Structure formats: C-alpha cells, structure tokens
C-alpha cells in the first residue's frame, strides 16, 4: 500500500509540474575514490589536522528548489514533517510551487534539521537506506529537534546525507593532481581576486541568489541561465564558494586527529562556502562558519552527499 501511495504521489507531482525541467537533472554526483588524505584547515585556520576519507560522492549542485519541493511534498504524504517549507532562492515565496524562474535556484529558508530529515526522505523515495536515526528509528520529523540533535549518522549507509566538514573541504579544494590552497575561492587558480568572481556569486557580483551552476555567466534579468553553464571547480563541482552557505554534518569545534566527524555534542553546526550575502563574506575553501541548527536564512542551503560503494 505504501509503494502504491508513493507512485500516486510521484504521478501527482509529474502532473502539477509539467512546465519545469525534471529535477532529476539536479542530482549529478561526483565520486572520489583515491588520493583521499589531506590537511583540513590548511592555509586558513590556526589549527589543522590530517583527514583520510572513505570514498564518497557529492552533488555537483547545491540542492535546487524544484528538487527540494518534489521530495518534500512527496515525503509529507508519507508521514514526514518539516519545520520550514523552504523557498526558491533568496527572493522566493515560502512553500510555493516552483516556477520557471526559481526551479533551479538553491532552496533557502530551511534549517539544519530540515536538511537532514529531507535527506532521509530522498533516500527512502529512491530506495536507499536513510543515514540519520535516533534510538534506531529513522528521523522523519525536523520539529523533533532533541532527536535530531542526538541523532547518529550511519557512514556506511548508501543513503543521502550532508557532507562531513572534511568531505566538504576536500571537494572544494581537490584538483586533478593535488589540492588547491585553502585561502582561495573554490576553483580559483591565481591570487587575482577578480578571478574568484568567475567561480562564485558573492556580494560583489550579485544581490541575490542565482541559478545553481551559473557563476561566471554575465547576469541578465531577461535570460534564465541554465545549470552547468557557469564555471565549476577543478573537481567539476559548482558553487562550492558563494551563492548560498552550505550545511555540514559536524558540530563546530577545533580540529583534532580524533574527531574526524566533529564532536558528539555541541551548540552550533558547521556551515561552509560563504554566500551572495554581505553577512557571509568569508568565501575561501578553508573558511568556517557555525550556526545554531534552528537558524534559517535566505542565504543558507545545502548539497547532498553519500558514501560511495
């Protein structure tokens, strides 16, 4: 019965969203399987640590509003609950049907709790094993913040999840033969600050979010720039710096060799990458922010990740 209900829900979404592009194109994973050891915080932080990662995949794009909307509305029909419905980019209307203008904008106005529960929903809908559980139960309610704060992540699961902070920085800095410096915008090669603007939507070249994967494309309000038409970093990932800040799994703490996924408890979760907003000007690969997991803003979003099998 549940599978039948899920099929009906997906059919309903296909009917009400005929004009927008398929959200499936907004999931394009890049997988890292080799050269998985590096120094986190190098060139930017007073404290660093060696990190050796297990193979993982991370999405080329920040999570788009059309993808968020389709998964959220399907999940709610399956018993999931979200504190915040999200919106399309920094200027969208909360919970509204995606439009041609904002379908490929990053989802914003969600908090960390919403993001991890949504990842569980995406995993279930796509037949994967959800990563986030509390007392053995799959998290399906982002308003149950106590359970979310105390939840565990199954790093061996094939389900979708937030990247760890170490995975995020690795993906931001990885080059074909090594790693770029941590004190540069992701994708930037030289020290020329103007070059960084070719890889990131920042407060210097944008006054709002832009479609994912379009950094470096001259902005024209009369033209809808398509994902992947901008500049990616050396690993083929878009917007690792700028556009929206991105949630990571870890509680915020100084790096040590032992806390490879952050401490077990804390007060604020790590966010990375900076954004278009003047409130988040630190855009370098090694720059860190931390926020209460209840906070949500129109410059915060996330991208999905999973352990590679």
Image: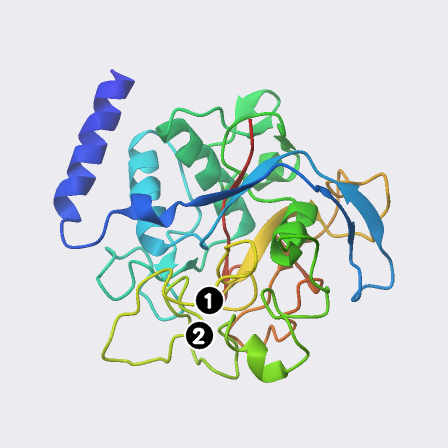
**Disc number for residue 115:** none
Q: Residue at image x 44%, y 40%?
A: 118
Q: Look at the picture and state if 122 lies above or below 210.
A: above
Q: Look at the picture and state if 283 lies above or below 53.
A: below
Asked if the residue under mark 2 is in contact with the one under mark 1, i.e. CB atoms within 8 Å, the reply is: yes
Q: Residue at image x 38%, y 75%?
A: 217
Q: Indicate the quadrant containing the N terminus: top left, top right, bottom left or bottom right.
A: top left
Q: Return the residue nearer the eye: 129 or 224.
A: 224
Q: Which residue is mark 2?
A: 216
Q: Look at the picture and state if 118 lies above or below 247.
A: above
In percent of width and height, residue 230 lies at 41, 67
Q: Evaluate whether residue 294 shows in this view.
A: no
**Disc number for residue 231:** 1
| Disc nearer the start of the sequence (1/2) | 2
Q: Indicate the quadrant containing the C terminus: top left, top right, bottom left or bottom right.
A: top right
Q: Secondary structure at mark 1?
A: loop
């Amino acid at each position: 019965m549940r599978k039948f209900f899920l099929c009906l829900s997906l059919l309903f979404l296909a009917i009400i969203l005929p004009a927008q592009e398929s959200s499936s194109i907004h999931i394009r994973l890049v997988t890292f399987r080799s050269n998985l050891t590096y120094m986190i915080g190098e060139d930017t932080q007073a404290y660093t640590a060696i990190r050796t990662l297990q193979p993982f995949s991370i999405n080329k794009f920040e999570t788009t509003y059309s993808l968020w909307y389709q998964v959220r509305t399907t999940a709610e029909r399956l018993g999931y609950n979200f504190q915040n419905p999200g919106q399309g980019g920094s200027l969208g209307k909360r919970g509204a049907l995606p439009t041609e203008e904002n379908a490929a904008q990053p989802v914003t106005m969600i908090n960390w709790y919403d993001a991890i529960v949504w990842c569980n929903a995406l995993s279930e809908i796509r037949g994967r094993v959800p990563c986030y559980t509390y007392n053995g139960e799959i998290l399906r309610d982002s308003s149950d913040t106590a359970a979310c704060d105390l939840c565990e992540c199954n790093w061996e699961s094939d389900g979708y999840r937030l990247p760890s902070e170490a995975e995020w920085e690795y993906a931001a800095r990885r080059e074909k033969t090594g790693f770029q410096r941590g004190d540069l915008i992701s994708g930037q090669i030289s020290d020329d600050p103007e070059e960084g603007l070719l890889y990131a939507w920042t407060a210097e070249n944008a006054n709002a979010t832009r479609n994912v994967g379009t950094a470096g494309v001259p902005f024209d309000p009369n033209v809808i720039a398509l994902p992947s038409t901008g500049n990616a970093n050396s690993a083929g990932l878009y917007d690792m710096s700028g556009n929206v800040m991105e949630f990571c799994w870890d509680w915020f703490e100084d790096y040590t060799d032992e806390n490879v996924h952050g401490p077990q408890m804390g007060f604020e979760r790590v966010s990375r990458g900076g954004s278009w907003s003047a409130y988040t000007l630190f855009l370098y690969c090694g720059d860190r922010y931390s926020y209460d997991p209840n906070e949500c803003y129109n410059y915060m979003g996330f991208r999905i990740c999973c352990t590679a099998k």
